[in-house]
Image (cartoon, rainbow, N blue to C red):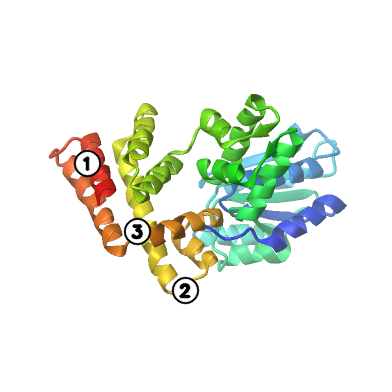
Amino acid sequence: MAKKSDSAGLGNLKAQLKSGTLRQIYLFFGEEDYLKEYYFGELKKKVLADGPSEFNFVLFEGGKIMWEQVDEALAAPPLMADKKLLLIRESGIFKTADVSARAYWERCLADLPEYVCVVFYEKEVDKRGALYKTVAQNGEAVECAYVEGVELYNWVLRGCRSAGLQIDRGAAEYLIAACDGGMNNLKQELGKLFSYCSGSITRADIDRVVTKMPQARVFEMINAIMKKDGHTVFLRLGELKTLKESPFMVLSLLCGSFSRILHAKLLCEEGSPHAQVASALGIPPFFVKDYTAAAHCFDKAFLRRAVCACAEIDFAVKQGKVEAWLAVEQFLAECVSV
């Protein structure tokens, strides 16, 4: 999850878009939806530039695509244009396809009409699979994973400058943490800040305008636990209640965060580099420093107790032995008082 985007595939795509020399097969995959959407949009504009796009764009979506319909779409030439575009979206064929599906697509991709560009748009792929290798050899596999910290910071900075606003590094990092690092969510929140702010964007502006993701609020609670700041812990908990979040979701996020902090602590003790920690924890690289900082502050015994306590609370609530929010509040109070 926390790998850098495949620079070769993305670099090749950028060069092809610039030169207009496109491949017939593309595979977009990875966690960062913003990059997939952006570059697919650019590719679509290039492929369908010389004709009516509504007649020459065909979408197939989901895991139950009828191959006969794909064959028909491939056989029909473009209308009043040189090219047509087929998008196969979230089909799962690069991860879970059976033998017959793989055989069909390998046969299909080996004999595409010259006027067709086929694009696969997936969340996950198996790079060891024969179908992935077929696309990589005969087309372009473009990985769009989470963007690294400096790259993401620079993207935020460019957006602010384009809007005529300034933002310092601390505020930018605070914004990224509040949005959990996803570029689509960041874009949406930046739009709100651009409308609200004048001159510059500050942390106070972010607190007033940005809708923080639940994970970000929970991690602020954990940071407050490190500082024995009970006021902030329960302030953030109150915000989650106001947003009608489930106590089970809050408990799950707390458990997951403490578990990842414990994992980070063990990896840091082994001398693992940040990139390896990010990959092992399944988090964007930008957030590694938050988890490693927390790992240095909490001892292993506390973290193990916290993870076990979350599981015990979940079970007790489901057994009807304690009210959910009360259990979460008591757990947090105990964490602060340790």
The count of marks equals 3
Q: Please give the name of the residue rendered at 59% of the width and 49% of the height, measured from the top-left corner.
A: 32
What type is the residue that disc 2 sits on? Gly
User: Is residue 126 found left or right of 10 in the rendered image?
Assistant: left
Vertical comparison of 85 with 281: above or below: above
Numbered badge on residue 271: 2
The residue labelled by disc 3 is 298
Label 2 residue SS: loop
Q: Earlier in the sequence, mark 3 or mark 2?
A: 2
Give the CA separation, mark 2 to mark 1.
35 Å
Give the CA separation, mark 3 to mark 2.
17 Å
Vertical comparison of 26 with 170: above or below: below
Tell me where residue 266 appears, x and y as whole percent. 38, 68
User: Is residue 65 found left or right of 52 in the rendered image?
Assistant: left
The residue labelled by disc 1 is 330
What type is the residue that disc 1 sits on? Gln
Q: Please name whichever residue, 143 or 120, is drawn nearer the observer in this view of the structure.
A: 143
Tell me where residue 251 appears, x and y as whole percent. 30, 44
Label 3 residue SS: loop
Q: Please name whichever residue, 75 or 101, is drawn nearer the observer in this view of the structure.
A: 101
Disc 3 or disc 2, which is closer to the eye?
Answer: 3
As drawn, the residue found furthest toward the left would be 321
Vertical comparison of 189 with 138: above or below: above
